[in-house]
Image: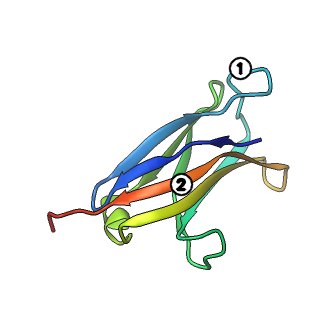
Amino acid sequence: MAIYANISIDQGSDFSTEVVVSDSAGNAADLTGYLVTGQLRKTYTSSTAVSFVCTITSAINGTISLALSNSTTNDLKAGRYVYDVEIQNGAGGDISRVIEGQVTVNPGVTR
């Protein structure tokens, strides 16, 4: 089951955060050989998505990095979005959602 966590992104700024994936016993999951993807959308049914740049920064410690460039966040309208991040056990393997929640994009002033 995925962890629910809300995140906040400043429009026009670089964004990055780290997520630690845990196994059912609460220990850091070993993500060796896994692939990771994540997207945000205005609503769950929106056809338009923005993909996070997802990187496994420490497979043995279950650490994933999510990032968006300042040009990407600048193109987002201020408001609320939904997001999730999934891991896949190798190409074609089982897929699990590890984190999900709401994204608040805070409007920027400086252009």
Residue 56 to residue 60: above or below? below
Q: Residue at x 51, y 63 (%)?
A: 81
Return the residue nearer the eye: 6 or 75. 6
Residue 25 horizontal/vertical position (percent): 79, 20
Question: Would residue 28 be found to the left or right of residue 83 on screen?
Answer: right
Circle 1: residue type: Asn
Q: Which residue is mark 1?
A: 27
| Neighbourhood count class around disc 2 (C-alpha, 10 Å): few under 14, some 14–19, many 20 upward | some
Q: Quadrant for the C terminus, please.
A: bottom left
Q: Residue at x 70, y 28 (%)?
A: 22
Residue 7 horizontal/vertical position (percent): 46, 47
Q: Residue at x 36, y 63 (%)?
A: 73
Q: Which residue is mark 2?
A: 102
Residue 109 to residue 15: above or below? below
Residue 4 horizontal/vertical position (percent): 63, 43
For the residue labelled by badge 1, is the local secondary structure a helix, a strand or a loop?
A: loop
Q: Within the image, what quadrant is residue 33 found in? A: top right
| Neighbourhood count class around disc 1 (C-alpha, 10 Å): few under 14, some 14–19, many 20 upward | few
Return the residue nearer the eye: 89 or 96. 96
